[in-house]
Amino acid sequence: MPNTQSNTVSKTPASVLLAAIPSVDRVLNMAATQDLIVEYGRMPVLTAIRAMLTELRDQVTRLDIAPPDILTEPAINSYLQSRLQRASRPTLRPVYNLTGTVLHTNLGRAQLPDVAIQAVIDAMTRPCNLEYDLDGGSRGDRDSLIEPLLLELTGAEAATVVNNNAAAVFLALNTLGLRREVIVSRGELVEIGGSFRVPDIMSRAGCKLKEVGATNRTHLKDYAESVSSKTALLLKVHTSNYAIQGFTATVAEKDLADLAHEHGLPFMVDLGSGTLADLKKLGLPSEPSPQESLASGADLVTFSGDKLLGGPQAGIIIGRRDFIARIKKNPLKRALRVDKMTYAALDAVLRLYRDPERLTQNLPTLRLLTRSVMEIDSMAKILLPVMEQALAGHAKVAIKPCHSQIGSGSLPIDLLPSMCLSITPHVRGRGEGSALKKIEQAFRSLPVPVLGRITDGAFCLDLRCLEEKYVNEFIVQLGQLSIIA
Ligand SMILES: *Cc1c(COP(=O)(O)O)cnc(C)c1O
């Protein structure tokens, strides 16, 4: 009877298997469980035990099997241990952004400088003068914490801050254009990150979108012909995350400002990723700055705090004093305002701009963007043997030149030369794609997940954003890399 053995195992009655599952109390009283209680607390351990027992009973009744080894004391303990470890891990975790996109919206955009982090800690730990005028001893305005600095750096008359740039655009449109028309070039009706669409923001802000021109070409006369008594303002959106190349025409900010002012209308610019630094001087491709838009005659300029500026998530609105005053009186300002942590971080970051010589040293975003290929390459050389060892038997590793992107909508065509570790699975042809995905997944499953990008049959880790101070941690955790064959 060759089959009896397996038949007996699978045909053990469920009732017998169920009876073998220990009670909550028995697991609770195991010596190893007591240690877990000391580490994690009684309630979390109890929750984990109940979840484990439910899972076991479920297996027995549904599948008619009870893997016998799970019922031993060490097995129960290691199950609980890993369950408790997972449950106690924060959901928002650090990752390695080796995707090659420096300001990655899905990975939290700008990394803040230490001075900003310290300022946030102070603001969170102790009471602060968020809305308190220490000179006059009376109620203050939270915008006055950063307004003088913004004016100093941009030359604007007034400034205010909201939750992000989408909120800045929304609030400005709602304040100046409610129930009236806003003229925008058809070529600028961008969608950013799948959720910021100019037409949608416009309609929610209560404005009527008046599109002018064609997708690739818009001329000054297109704007001029659309101005009417219903016009509230002219808007220019910096089409940062895509570029139409070839037969194109856009109208200069100066011309639009002049046209708007001839009709007594405001001209607003949504810059998206406005930079306060002179990127050309830093050897980076140039990006429009809020200062330039103001100098061209813009009455309001909006930009993000956590894109090229390198600060916390925020939307900054600068421009004419009377318009900013109206924006601040809009009841929606209260709904879109930022908290003390944002002011603390933004203030610290803006202060760094007073010292342009040391900006690339002090501001992580610019430090990463200006990192030299040579520096990145020397890191690649250190990592190559370690990586080869971690992937032995699975994949080949090589140092290859690649291009990083600024990200968050900036400069889609101008790429930054960089270096990557290019990982190609040994499996070629059929099964290659899935082998590649398994490698990608293994890196993603590390304690500090490593995120790269798959291009041309290789998993690429662009090392531009691997900072010196994390290299050691990076190498150590590679020992835990496990690729499921
Ligand atoms: C990024 C961007 C926005 C949205 O800014 P958030 O800070 O992400 O809200 C709006 N307009 C433009 C042109 C952008 O590039």
Image (tube, rainbow, N blue to C red):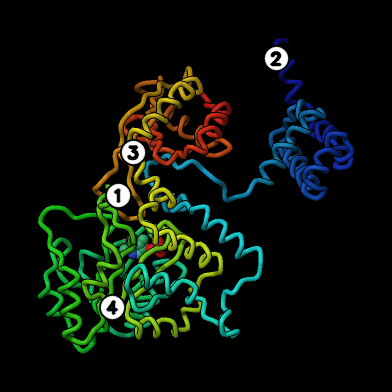
**First reached walking from the N terminus: tag 3 or tag 4:** 4
Q: Which residue is mark 1?
A: 282
Q: Out of 76 and 371, give the one closest to the viewer.
A: 371
Outermost residue, top direction? 1
Q: Quadrant of residue 202?
A: bottom left
- Where disc 4 sits, the SS reads loop
**Amino acid under disc 1:** Leu
Relative side of 148 to 449, left or right: left
Q: Nearer the viewer, mark 4 or mark 2?
A: 4
Q: Residues within 10 Å of mark 2 (few under 14, many from 20)?
A: few
Ligand 1 neighbours mark 2 (CB distance < 8 Å): no
Q: Which residue is mark 2?
A: 3
Q: Which-is-in-front pick, marks 1 and 4?
A: 1
Q: Say which amino acid is labelled 3.
A: Ser
Q: Which residue is mark 3?
A: 372
Work out whether mark 2 precedes mark 3 in sequence or the reverse, and give the earlier one: 2
